[in-house]
Image: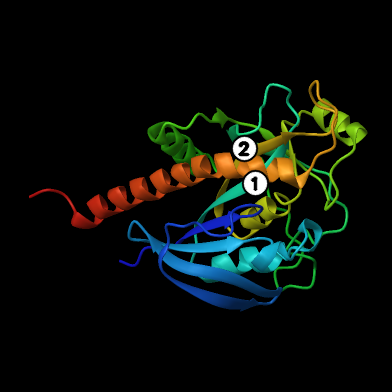
Amino acid sequence: MTRPPLGIIAGTGFYDLGSLEDTTEQTVTTAFGDARVTLGSWHGIPVVFLTRHGAGHSVPPHLVNYRANIRALADLGVRDVVAVNVTGGIDPALAPGDLLVLDDFLDFTRQRPVTFFDGTTPEGVVHTDVLEPYHPEIRREVLEAASAAGRPVRDGGVYACFEGPRFETRAEIRLARLAGADVAGMTGVPEVTLAAEAGLRYAAISLVVNPASGVGDADEPITMEEIDAVLASSAADVLAVLDELVHTRATLTDADEDGPAA
């Protein structure tokens, strides 16, 4: 039986997973445009890796072709997706380097295509349920992988997605916090809802890299130097969680394929 590939999507600071073997680059053409992906193997499991911002971080968050990206993963046979989002901390208890496994989101974007079902497709208008936008089973896998890898992670968090590419104002962050947001980012929506529309089981790891605007005692501008420094010291934690998740999947799948003991 051919294993369906695991989809991994990442953005700022995660342009190469490092552990993929036998990699090939492929452009996947969809009805919504082209998506560039890396095909490879990790612990013997097929993986499709997609970096949202393209080569050299050339695509800003509001211009990422989220529909093409998700459709490409689905067309390649992906069923499960683990995404990585680099975020600013809205909850004052969060510090740079902290990890969360998200369980809900707020959408403050304004101009992105947000659905496959815009009335022009054969399916017509479709209303997709997102009571649990981050799949409980994949979330559990990520949490268990983090525990096994010895990486502390918060179980749950609300992601507030803003349009970008500018950072948020103090007032926008205050509004998001009043609405219950824990972290702010620019790429998690509509990616998560498109995955639901495509029937993919999707979970996301949030890596906090800075306090959001006006959060905490410091009131300094957010800089890419600050973000890059946290990424340099904390990206390994995210990769360790992903490595453990894939390794566990490989072990369980191998046991399933071997069948019951005689």
Mark whose residue sits in front, 2 or 1: 1
Query: Is residue 85 shown to the viewer in this render?
Result: yes
Q: Nearer the viewer, residue 9 or 214?
A: 214
- Percent coordinates x, y for residue 205 in the rendering: 58, 42
Q: Residue at x 7, y 50 (%)?
A: 262
- Percent coordinates x, y for residue 126 in the rendering: 73, 59
- Give residue 247's mark: none
Q: Is residue 74 above or below residue 175?
A: below
Q: Secondary structure at mark 1?
A: strand
Q: Is residue 231 above or below residue 55?
A: above
Q: In the drawing, does residue 249 fall left or right of residue 62?
A: left
* For the residues bearing labels 2 and 1, Cβ distance under 8 angstroms: yes
- Percent coordinates x, y for residue 160 in the rendering: 76, 39
Q: Nearer the viewer, residue 218 or 54?
A: 218
Under mark 2, the amino acid is Leu
Q: How many marks?
A: 2
Query: Is residue 54 shown to the viewer in this render?
Result: no
- Colour mapping used in the image: rainbow
Q: Residue at x 73, y 72 (%)?
A: 121
Q: In the drawing, does residue 208 fall left or right of residue 39?
A: right
Q: CA distance from mark 2 to mark 1?
A: 10 Å
Q: Is residue 58 above or below residue 175?
A: below
The image quadrant that residue 157 belongs to is top right
Circle 1 residue: 85
Circle 2 residue: 102
Under mark 1, the amino acid is Asn
Q: Local crowd at mark 1 within 10 Å, few (<14), some, or many (≥20)?
A: many
Quarter of the picture holding the N terminus: bottom left
- Percent coordinates x, y for residue 110 in the rendering: 88, 53
